Amino acid sequence: MSVESLESADALPELPSNRFSDRELSWLAFNRRVLDLARDDLRVPLLERTRFLSIFFSNLDEFFRVRVAGLKRRINADIALRSSSGYLPRELYDIIFRQTREVTAEAYALFDNVIRPELAASGIHILTWAELTDAEREFIDSHFGARIRPVLDPVAVDQSHPMPYVSGLSVSLAVTLRNPRTGRKRFGRVKVPNNLPRFVPLGHDRFIPIELIMTQQLGKGIYRGMQIESSAAFRVTRNEDLEVEEDDAENLLTALEKELQGRRTDRPPVRLEVEDHMDTAMLERLLDELGMQESEVIRLPSMLDLSALSQFADLERESLKYPSFLPKTHPELAIVERSESADIFAALRSRDVLLQHPYDAFATSVQRFIEQAAEDPDVLTIRQTLYRTAEDSSPIIDALIKAARRGKSVMVVVELKARFDEETNINWATKLKAAGCHVIYGLVGLKTHCKLAMVVREEGENLRTYCHVGTGNYNHQTARIYEDMGLLTANPFIARDVENVFNHIATESEETYKRMLVAPEGVRKGLLRAIQNEIDNHAKGLPSGIRIKVNSIIDETLTDALYRASQAGVKVDMWVRGICSVRPGIPGLSENIRVRSILGRFLEHSRAYWFANAGNPRVAIGSSDLMHRNLDRRVEVLVGINHPRHIAQIEHLFDIAFDEGTASWWLSGDTWTQRTAVDGKPLLDIQEHLIAQVGQRRAVR
């Protein structure tokens, strides 16, 4: 079967209509796996479990800000098309809220009944008002007057004092006030300040939520002289997805800045969280003010916004955390031990280097690559893509600025539309342009998501190009907590491909590639060809097999291609961190497909593709997940890995991930099953295993 027929739904064999898992419900299942980590007292230390509980809630916030917001927008626009999973928008919307209420109740039960008591048993106390000592109450009275009250903006709503705009994700107190002289009732709202610690430290690892202090001060420190009839906390989640019309790059910058202002002042609400003791009249008043329905309300049993628990995860209590880990310089970049930094260019002239962060230090590999290029007088040109980078400081950007000021030609592709990093990227783009860098914003209608860096160096009478092709962002901070891969190389074929990608982004020219698949034109087609090749090889009795590691897969065409590979007898292993539309283990459809998910102290973020190819494996890494946005609306790159040592390294990762002795989640149909221990003994943690292997590696000469 040809690639063209693979891409045609009409040419596919008859497949069941219920073959796709729903994207949104699969995401909720992923977040349940994050919650599983918060429950895992066998493998995960207490403060790390607290961190995972915080991540569970912050993940849920983003899900509502973007995915549920988009679903509500389709409902309001009367778009009644069924998804590939068979749901109408309203049906899916109702299911999401029902499942969210269920899983949120589980998370609060975990916090109230397990995490909070265990923190207390370890000497970390999140206190109620009744648990305070007299001395602590005196301190709080003083602290409130000196540090909290001056930054509050309480409002009592009436005809001359309208309800102020309630910003997204901010915790507020709703208050029913009564004037004792006139008997008149009013509605009050006080926003919990987000520029103060959410949990006020009282000393000796004792803390109290700031909103609890504010609640106790309502009648005497905030609404003096008023009677407080009732109060309860609430929190609104708003649509935070930006919709920007693109005409050209400069107009995009202006339009995006305007939209960012709108994000702060006028975004439709999609979820209202309230304390479960909020009375009916107060809730009805809030719903009326916000223009929301009661179906969008989620009642919670205790303090709102448990993403703030990250404050405790950062406490200096090493015995309650994962053992410390310091990334090491890749052995092939540090063959000769010396005090000065390694010569990256000299290393790459003799070999390619396959990196896996955070086990391989980002600072002494990718960061050093750009820093050395900025300092080297023989370097003429640097080209770089930037999608997400650190907000306050970035050694990579500092090096690019230094290079431009030294007279080198520096071109930087800054993706302005990286969700929730738009403002940061605008600021960095402005600084890079001011330093003399040539800054472009990519192609109209496409996000530039590929991770590429290219350095052209004069060596004698020739020019040599060095490149980095990665799966993760050029961010020195996330490189210590995200698992990613990258190839450092001076291979001339890859160098030409990278040069062509930059030329395509800068000029919209049509380019061809030898060692890369480039989206939106090439990634889906190239993967479909590779899948069909495995089907053909299996039919011929030749070695066949497919192994894929991605964050998410929802593309129907590729999912169907994998189903057909399974039907043909090809073994398919999929290592998926998040969303998965594939339903493995269905007789006659996917009994040859295995899906595993691995979550741990590092965020599994790399994308890798392996095809048996009749015994001569074809392997690639890159930036692309198997989602419509990656394949159709982004510039993405997969680069071929050719060195046998690097192929073996990637094969070894898959071998460990799919070993039954490795801790993971197994998917069957739509159901994920956690397998982290057998008979009370923990299974192998692949990330901890790789940490242990770091110090044992040696350079291959």
Image: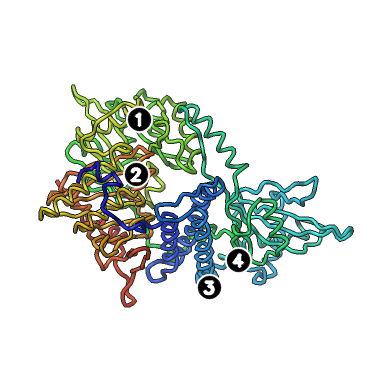
Residue tagged 2: 363
Q: Amino acid at mark 1?
A: Ile
Give the spatial CA distance, label 3 vs label 1.
53 Å
| SS of the residue under disc 2 | loop
| SS of the residue under disc 4 | loop
Residue tagged 3: 113
Q: Residues within 10 Å of mark 1 (few under 14, many from 20)?
A: some
Give percent across and percent down for residue 332: 21, 45
Give the spatial CA distance, label 2 vs label 3.
42 Å
Q: Amino acid at mark 2?
A: Ala
Q: Which of the two discs, 2 and 4, labels the residue nearer the N terminus?
A: 4
Residue tagged 1: 505
Q: Which of the two discs, 2 and 3, labels the residue nearer the N terminus?
A: 3
Q: Residue furthest right?
A: 181
Pair 2/4: label in front: 4
To which quarter of the image does residue 543 belong?
A: bottom left
Pair 1/4: label in front: 1
Q: Residues within 10 Å of mark 3 (few under 14, many from 20)?
A: few
Residue 302 badge: 4
Q: Nearer the viewer, residue 348 or 450?
A: 450
Query: From this viewpoint, is residue 242 visible?
Result: yes
